Amino acid sequence: MRTDQRNTNSLRPITITTNFIKHPEGSVLIQVGETKVICNATIEDRVPPFMRGQGKGWITAEYAMLPRATQERNIRESSKGKVTGRTMEIQRLIGRALRSVVDLEKIGERTVWIDCDVIQADGGTRTASITGAFVAMVLAFGKLLDSNTLKKMPVTDFLAATSVGILPDGTGILDLNYEEDSKANVDMNVVMTGSGEFVEIQGTGEEATFSMDQLHILLELANEGLSEIFEMQKNALEKLASRIGETMEDKGDSK
Amino acid sequence: MRTDQRNTNSLRPITITTNFIKHPEGSVLIQVGETKVICNATIEDRVPPFMRGQGKGWITAEYAMLPRATQERNIRESSKGKVTGRTMEIQRLIGRALRSVVDLEKIGERTVWIDCDVIQADGGTRTASITGAFVAMVLAFGKLLDSNTLKKMPVTDFLAATSVGILPDGTGILDLNYEEDSKANVDMNVVMTGSGEFVEIQGTGEEATFSMDQLHILLELANEGLSEIFEMQKNALEKLASRIGETMEDKGDSK
Amino acid sequence: MRTDQRNTNSLRPITITTNFIKHPEGSVLIQVGETKVICNATIEDRVPPFMRGQGKGWITAEYAMLPRATQERNIRESSKGKVTGRTMEIQRLIGRALRSVVDLEKIGERTVWIDCDVIQADGGTRTASITGAFVAMVLAFGKLLDSNTLKKMPVTDFLAATSVGILPDGTGILDLNYEEDSKANVDMNVVMTGSGEFVEIQGTGEEATFSMDQLHILLELANEGLSEIFEMQKNALEKLASRIGETMEDKGDSK
Amino acid sequence: MRTDQRNTNSLRPITITTNFIKHPEGSVLIQVGETKVICNATIEDRVPPFMRGQGKGWITAEYAMLPRATQERNIRESSKGKVTGRTMEIQRLIGRALRSVVDLEKIGERTVWIDCDVIQADGGTRTASITGAFVAMVLAFGKLLDSNTLKKMPVTDFLAATSVGILPDGTGILDLNYEEDSKANVDMNVVMTGSGEFVEIQGTGEEATFSMDQLHILLELANEGLSEIFEMQKNALEKLASRIGETMEDKGDSK
Amino acid sequence: MRTDQRNTNSLRPITITTNFIKHPEGSVLIQVGETKVICNATIEDRVPPFMRGQGKGWITAEYAMLPRATQERNIRESSKGKVTGRTMEIQRLIGRALRSVVDLEKIGERTVWIDCDVIQADGGTRTASITGAFVAMVLAFGKLLDSNTLKKMPVTDFLAATSVGILPDGTGILDLNYEEDSKANVDMNVVMTGSGEFVEIQGTGEEATFSMDQLHILLELANEGLSEIFEMQKNALEKLASRIGETMEDKGDSK
Amino acid sequence: MRTDQRNTNSLRPITITTNFIKHPEGSVLIQVGETKVICNATIEDRVPPFMRGQGKGWITAEYAMLPRATQERNIRESSKGKVTGRTMEIQRLIGRALRSVVDLEKIGERTVWIDCDVIQADGGTRTASITGAFVAMVLAFGKLLDSNTLKKMPVTDFLAATSVGILPDGTGILDLNYEEDSKANVDMNVVMTGSGEFVEIQGTGEEATFSMDQLHILLELANEGLSEIFEMQKNALEKLASRIGETMEDKGDSK
C-alpha cells in the first residue's frame, strides 16, 4: 500500500483545465495529484534561423518552476543568470516529444512555443508538462484551423507521459509522487503515442541498477497508466480530439 | 465612460484567495480585473550578509511574469540570462514598501522572501503585487505566531497600492487596465498605509508632464480606491487582521 | 541649521562647465556641492530596432559611478558582469525625463545617448545627472543646428531635477547631501520643466511614511530650488537657451 | 551492409590507451572508430557543499568538444559564456552512471572529477566517454590504493555504454557512427554493468516512434556489444580489473 | 615633423594633478597631451584569498574608459556584461608593473586597488595610467605613513611608462598620439624604473616586423622620455619623493 | 646545469605531428618537451562584420587548456562562464603574430580560425601554440592551393616563438619548462620571422627588473633557439615550405 493509499498501478487524480490563461493561443492547467503546471502554447509566424527556408515549422519548449513550487524555496533561474542542467534536459525532452507527433511540414514556417510553468510540485512535473503541453498545443492548432490558417490538424497522434519506478523493496509503481520519487531506486519516464508506440524512454538507476525483467514490469505499468491519460486528453479536447490523425489518414489515402 | 464601463473612480473587481499554493508559509492569488498574480511569502531563518549581527530582520521581493502573461509572448528572463531594469525597479519597490510597515527588529534575524509571479497581466501588476504580497506576508507571520516563534505580529499597519493616471483628454482615472495604461499621459503608482500615510509616490509623465492641480486629483482618486482595498485585505486576513498594529500599540503604551 | 550651514531651502553651490570632454557632441561637468558628474551626449544616426521605421528619434541614458566616487570603493559593474537595480532605475529615469521635453519626431531617426559618469559622489547624483544631461543634450542638438542637420531646436522646455527630504525631526530640506540623505526619513526626487510642470515625482519613505501636508512642503521646496537651477542652465547654454521652445511655438502657431 | 562494411551487430574498433596525460590521477585516450576522447580523472580531497559532513564521496563529470572535433567548427562554450543543454545532459549522464557502480561511502569525503574532452567526433561521443571515464576513474582509485589512502577498491562492478539505433528501413544496428546517427529514426544509449544490469536507458524517437518489439532488438544488440567492451576494459586495467567488486564481495560476506 | 609639430624625441605636455578626487587614499588626474586619466588608489585592509596568511600585501589594478573618451562612443563594459581582452591586458600590465617597485612584505596583509579611468583618450592611455597610478599609489602610502600605519615607504624605486613606435617611413618616435598610433607599423610600450632598469617591454609589429637596430632606437627614445617623466613625478610627489627607496636603502644597510 | 640536464641555450625536444585531427583544414600536434598542444586551423568563407567589404581576410585565434593539462585541475572556462585575462592575452597574441606574416589581401574575404588546445602543460604553452599554429595555418592554405581556391601561398615568411628568462642567480636560459618559469625573475616571449625580424617581444620582470645587457643576452638566446625551430617547421611542412614567401617575391618582382 502506497503512502497515499493508491494501488501500485493507480494514477493520481488528474484534471486538465483548458483556456486557463486568456492571452495564449492554447492554455491548460494540468493537475496530477498535488502537482500543478500551467502549459501555454504560442504560435509565432516564423522559425528560428537554423530552420529558415525549408518550408517547415518548429516546436520548442521552455520549463520553469516558481520559487515556492517546492517545499524549500528554490532560487529563481533569472536571478542565477543561467538555466540549470535539469531545466535544459526537461525542456529539450518536451520539445522533442511534441515534435514526434506533429507533421512539421503541415504547419508551415511557424514556431510553436510551449511554456510549462510549475506552480506547485509534488513529483512528475516533467511528465505532467508533456501531457498538458500536448493539449495546449492542440488547442493552439485549433485556433489556426478556426481561422483557416491551417486546413488540417497537423497532429498525427495523441501524446502523453508518465513516470514509473521501483521502490527499494522491489515493487514497481506507477505515477510517483515526490516522496516516492525520493526513495525509489529506479526512476523511468515514458512518453508514448495514443497508438501505443514509444517516443521516449528514460530509465535511470540513481546509484542502483535494474534488470530486463524489471524493465518489462515498468513498461507495462506505464502502458496501463497512459491508456487512462489518453482518455482524459480526449475529454479535455472535446471536438478537436476527433481531428487528430487526419493528416495521418491523408497520408494513408495518398499512398 | 471607460472601456470597461467603470466610473473614473471605480476599482476593477478584486479577489484575494489565501493559501493558494501549499508549500509557502504565506500564499495568495490576487486578481484585479484580469490581472492575476501569485504572491508567496517564505520565511528564512537568516538574513543576507549585509544585515548580519544587527538582531534585525529583512524583507526582499522578487517579481516575474510568465512568458504568456502578456498579449505577445515575452522572453523569459532566465533565457536572457539577466533581469530587466523594469523587473528590478518593481522588485525593489515591493520590498521597500513592505519594509515600511514592519518592525524589522521584532522579526529577529529572519528574511521574508516575497515572490510575485504574474500569471496573467492586464495593467497594474506592480500595485496588485504589493497588495497581494502584504496579505501573503501577514499570513506567513501568522504561522510564526501560531508556532510561538513570534509573540506579537510585527506588522504596524495595513499596506496596499493602486495606480492612477491622466487620459489624453485630461480625465483622472483610478486603477488603469492595460489599454488605459497604454494611452495615459501620466501614470502614477501610490502606496499607502491603512492609516492614510504615503509610503511611495511614483508619478511619471512619459513624454508628457502634469500640474500641481492634476497631482491633487490623482492623489485623491488613489486615496479613495485604497480605502476599499484595505477592507478587502481585512476580509481576506480574517482574525489576523485584528493583530496588525499590536507592535505599534505597544510602542504607544511604553511611551 | 544644516551640517554645511545651509538654510532648509538653500541649494548647494552649482557649477556647469560646458565642453568638458572634447570628443562628444555635447559635454558637461556638473558640480552640485561635492557631487561631480560628467554628462556626455552622443548623436547616433539610427534608432534601436523597436523604433525603426517610425520616423522618430529616441533618447536613452546610461549612468555609472567610478569605483572611488564613493567613500568606500564600490565594485565596478563591468567586473560584476551586471548592472545593479539602482543603476537601472537611475538610467531609466534620466532617459524618460529627457524624452518628456523633446519632440522626438523633430530629431528624425536618430538616437541621443546620454552618459552620466559620477566621478565624485556626495548625494543627489541622479538629480545632478538629469540637470547636467539636459545641458549636454541641448549642446549636442546645437551642433546639429550648426550643421543644418536640424532646422529647429527640438527641445520644448527646460528640464532639471533636485532632491528634497524630511529629516527625523520633521524638517523639510532642499538638495540633500550624502550625510543628510543617509539620515532622512523621506527622500523625494522631483523633475520639473522650466514652465513649472512635473515630469516625475519619486517620493519614498524608506522604513517610514509621510502625510499629504509633508508632501506639499516638499514640493514647494523643490519648486523654489528648481527655479534657481533653470537660471544656471540658461547661463550655461548662452545663446542656445533662447532657441528652446521654438518647436513648441511653432506648434502653437500652426494651430 | 553498413557504410563502413560492418555487420549490424559489430562494434567499431576500440582502443583504450591508459596514462595518456601525465598530470591526472587517471588518464585514458579512448578511440571508438574515428571518435577520440581524452578522459581524465582527478581526485579532490573534499566534496561539494551539499555533500559535506555525510562521510561520503561524490563523482561529477564535465564534457566538452574541441571546436574542430566536428566537421564544421563549433563555437567554444567558453566564448559563448554558457554551456549548452546538450553538454549539460551528457555530463549529468556520465556522472550519474559512474556513481551507480561506486560505493560512495568507501571513498570518504572526496570528489572524483571526470573530464571527458572529445578531440575528434564521429558519433557515440557520450557512450565512448562513459566507457573511457570508467577506466580513468579506476586508474585514479588505483593510485589511492597504492598510497594506502584507500584499503579496498570502491568500485562494485564494471560499467560501459554503447549506442544502438533503428535505420529508416527498420534495421537495428549497434554502435552508430556519425553518418548513421544522422539518418537513424530511433537512437538509444544504453549503460550497463559488467553483471548485465541496466544503469540507464535513453531511447529517443526524434520525429519518429518505436514499438516494444523494436525495443527488444535494440537492447539485445546493446547487450552483445557491451560484453565485448567489458573485455577491453579488463585488458586495459590489467591487475586493477581483478580488484573491482571487492567491496561488493565484502558486503556479501558480511551478510 | 609630426602632426602636432613635435620632434621625434619630444613628449607631449604632461600635467599631474594630485588629490583630484576627495574620497580615495591617493588620487591623481594625469594629462598627457589630450589624454586624461583619473588614477585613484584605495587601501583595503585585507588581501585576496590566494594571498592570505603569507604576511604580504597585494596590488591590483582596474582600467576603464568612459564611453565618450573616444571619438566614436564605445559600449560600456558593464552593459556588455564582460570586460574585453584589451582591458584585461591593460589592467594586468598596470598591476604587474606597480608590484615590481613595491616591497609587498612591507605593506602587510593589505591590498592596493588602483583604478584608472580614462575620461578622454588620445593615444597612450595605458602608459599614462601607469605613470599616474604610480603617483596615486605613493600618495596613498603617504597617508599610511602619516597615520603611522606604516613606518617606512614600501616603494623601492620610481616607475613610469611611455610608448614608442616606428612610422611607415621608418622613423622612430616617442609618445605616440592616437593618430600616430593608428598608422605606426610597430608599437612598443616600455615600463622602466627610476634607476633605468626595464620592468616590461611590449613591442608589437601589427602586420609588420622590426629589426634589432630598430629595437635599439626605440629603447633609447623611451629611455630619454622616461627621464623627463620621472622629474614630473618627483615634482608632483613633493616631499614624499624623497622617501622612495628608503626600504631599498635599508636592505642595502642590512647586508 | 638545468633540472633536465639541458644547457642554458638548449631547446627541449620538439616534435610536430601534422594532420593530427581529421576534420580541420590544417591540424598539428606540437610537443615541446612535456608540453603538448593541438593546433587546428579552420578556413571560413567570410570575415567578421568589422572587416566586411574590404576585400581582405582575417586571422583570429582561440586558446584553451584542458582542465588537467596542469598539475592541479583548473576550472573549465565554460563553467566559469567567462574567459580569463590570461587566455585573452594569449589568444590576442597568437592572432596578431600570425597576421604579421600573411598577406591578408591575398586570402580574400576569408577568416582563418586557429584553435590551440593545450592537452598537457609544462611551460611555454603560448610559444608552442604560435609555432604549431603557424604550421597548421600553412597546411590549411595548402588545401586552398590544392583546390585552386588560392593561386599563391599568402604566407610571406616563417614564424615561430620561444621563451627566454633569467634565473634568480642571473643566468639567462632558453625555452623554460614549468619549474624554471615558476622561479625565473624575468620571463620573455619572443616571436620572430624566418628572416630574423622581431614580430613581438614581451618581457616581464614579475616583481623584478632587468637591464639592457640582460635584454641582449635574452634576445640572443631566443634568436639561436628559433633558428632551430624554423628547421623543424620546414621539415614538418615538406613541399609546402618552399612555397612560403612566393607572395613576397612577387611583390619584389612587381617593383
Image (cartoon, coloured by chain):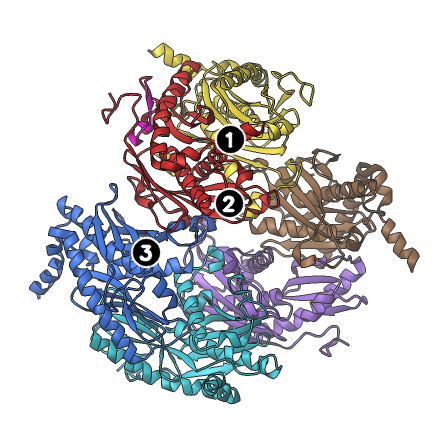
Chain colours: A red, B blue, C cyan, D yellow, E purple, F brown
Please identify the quadrant where the N terminus of chain E is shown.
bottom right
Mark 3 and mark 2, same subunit? no
Residue E76, which numbered label? Answer: none
Residue at image mark 3: B50
Disc 1 to disc 3: CB gap under 8 Å: no
Q: Quadrant of residue B155?
A: bottom left
For label 2, the SS is strand
Q: Is residue C147 magenta?
A: no
For label 1, the SS is helix
* Position above or below: B68 against E25: above
Residue at x 40% of width, y 38% of height: A133
* Distance between the alpha carbons at the discs numbered 1 and 2: 21 Å
* Position above or below: C223 against A3: below
Along the line of sight, which residue is nearer the eye, F93 or C203? C203
Along the line of sight, which residue is nearer the eye, D117 or F107? F107
The amino acid pointed to by label 1 is Met
Q: Earlier in the sequence, mark 1 or mark 2?
A: 2
Residue at image mark 1: A248
The reply, left or right, for residue E177 in relation to residue D253 is right
For label 3, the SS is helix
**Range covered by the magenta-colored residues:** A171-181
The amino acid pointed to by label 2 is Thr
Please identify the quadrant where the C terminus of chain E is shown.
bottom right
